[in-house]
Amino acid sequence: MAVTGPVLEVQIEIPSVLAQSLQAANSPIPNSVTGIALIDTGASITSIDVSIATRLGLNPNGIAMVGTAGGAQQQPTYQARLSFPGTALPGFEHPKVLGCNLTGQMVMNQQPIIALIGRDYLLHCVFVYSGGAGAWSLSF
């Protein structure tokens, strides 16, 4: 865990409102995207790779000014649904996930990180990180 950090599988999909709208118009609903999410206690807002937002056909619903290691930047926000397959963790519709560039961020045999789970989600749960034991847990 010292190398990868606290990671889990995440499924990202269009919000239910958009899915209902597409269904009513007999338009195809984009397939969800599954990948790896990193729990990031340093992130105030949950983020998804902007390429995932593009793949799902999500349109920005705002702009957020964020502080990064490279300085302050404006980044788009999107509405999306995130869930965690194979866990008891509840999925959630998020009105403003941040679109960011996670290109090159890899873990566990070079699997790309497609999302960062920020404090906006973590505030609803208990997160325990035991570095010495190489373990972590997340519960509601």
Image (cartoon, rainbow, N blue to C red):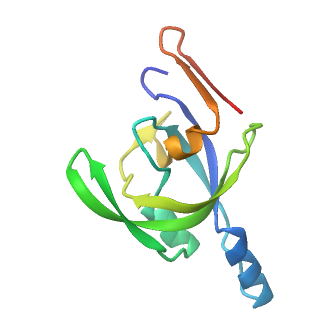
- Judged left or right of residue 35, residue 101 is left
Q: Nearer the viewer, residue 44 or 29?
A: 44
Residue 31, by quadrant, is: bottom right
Q: Nearer the viewer, residue 63 or 29?
A: 63
Indicate whether 51 appears above or below 137.
below
Query: Which quadrant is home to the C terminus?
Result: top right
Point 73% across, 83% down: residue: 21
Please, is residue 13 above or below residue 119 in the view?
Answer: below
Count of numbered badges drawn on the protein: 0
Q: Residue at x 47, y 46 (%)?
A: 112
Location of residue 105 by image quarter? top left
- Where residue 137 sits in the image (x, y, percent)? 63, 24
Q: Residue at x 46, y 37 (%)?
A: 40
Residue pushed farthest bottom? 25
Question: Percent x, y for residue 27?
Answer: 72, 87
**Side (left or right) of 131 relative to 128:** left
Residue lying at the far left of the rendered structure = 71
Position in image of residue 117 (x %, y %): 52, 44
Q: Position of residue 113 (x, y in %)?
A: 47, 46
Establish if 12 lies above or below 119.
below
Toward the viewer: 51 or 98?
A: 98
- With respect to residue 133, does 80 lie above or below? below
